[in-house]
Image: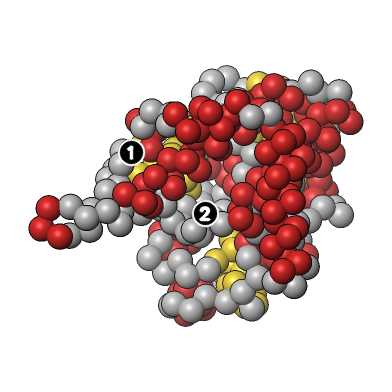
Amino acid sequence: MPTISVIIPIYNAEKYLRKCLDSVLGQTHRDLEVILVDDGSTDNSGQICEEYTKDQRVKLIRKKNGGAASARNIGLSVTTGDLIHFVDSDDYLELNMYEKLLKIIAEDDADFIGFSCFFEYENGEHEIYGYNDSKIRLMAANEYFESCLRKTNILMPWGYICSSKLWKNIKFPENIIFVEDAFAIIPIILNATKIVCVGIPFYHWYLCSDSISRGKITLAKISSFFLMYDYWFACSKKYGWNVDKLIINNYHGVVKNFVLLTYIRFRAFLPCSGNKKAQIKPDIRKMPTPAVAKLFCLVPYPFVAFGVKLISKICKKKHNIK
């Protein structure tokens, strides 16, 4: 049976880590190489990882904090398995996930398989995200990327399993601090000889109640999005995929979310009755598109992208950031 190398970047994930690791090591497919990359955690994540090294399938790598991209790249550099899958340390898997997907890979002679997931909330609610047809579908590279833009497939690295050969000479960009995983999918699918998709949710993508507004909306994060879109536009042109309209639609969705997240964070500091700060955690899925987001989307993408890059360049020069 083929061995799957499972790479798990870890940073301060003690609250969720055991559930994640139990779901990986408890797989009905036992031929695994589980690579834990502790990215400089300051909580008990490192100690928890150490406990799981009693399982001979587990390798633990400790490094200084450098972000998810560098952790994934280090994991890639030591893999020996036939297939590679990434798992986020706050997520978990159905226990038969690898067994079922390997069966499909073998039957269809595929070297890449995409699958759907449960988008899971802390209150127990969930929705299925990604490809929603239980029938196995064969896709070309451009079809798969287009489906990612339509959100009927998943571009994050935990949303697919592929041959380790497809990762040869491919790395996650470490100079991009946000959405860095969106840069890997295109060279991977271009390298693939046979892409299949199945709409069975095996993966639980966990969103805790405060993660909607987790982290600051920084210029660096916004700049990362524009670098991603520029890359996507370039690929669309280079390979003749003609998906520019879908990329713009995706961009408009991000604009809406940035505006909503800014609004949520602002509301959290507004005074309410009893002079207490408002503890507001609205459901972003049900919130209407703000007027400011609609107006912002009327501005052509090239003008916005140029403005963000110019401001980013000025800020980097001012603070001597390379």
Q: CA distance from mark 2 to mark 1?
A: 18 Å
Q: Amino acid type of disc 2? A: Ile
Please, is residue 309 above or below residue 296 in the view?
Answer: below
On screen, residue 113 versus residue 93, left or right, reads right
Question: What residue sits right under mark 1 in the picture?
Answer: 283
Crowd band around label 2 with a 10 angstrom C-alpha radius: few (<14), some (14–19), many (20+): some
Element marked by disc 1 = loop
Q: Residue furthest left?
A: 274
On screen, residue 2 versus residue 264, left or right, reads right
Question: What residue sits right under mark 2 in the picture?
Answer: 217
Q: Amino acid type of disc 1? A: Asp
Quarter containing the C terminus: bottom right
* Residue 288 image offset from top left, x and y in percent: 38, 28
Q: Earlier in the sequence, mark 2 or mark 1?
A: 2
Q: Quadrant of residue 136?
A: top right
On screen, residue 240 versus residue 182, left or right, reads right
Q: Nearer the viewer, residue 305 or 236?
A: 305
Q: Nearer the viewer, residue 261 or 28?
A: 261
* Residue 54 image offset from top left, x and y in percent: 52, 76
Element marked by disc 2 = loop
Q: Residue furthest right?
A: 238
* Residue 260 image offset from top left, x and y in percent: 43, 40
Front of the two marks 2 and 1: 2
Image point (46%, 51%), residue name: 92
Please, is residue 322 above or below residue 116 in the view?
Answer: below
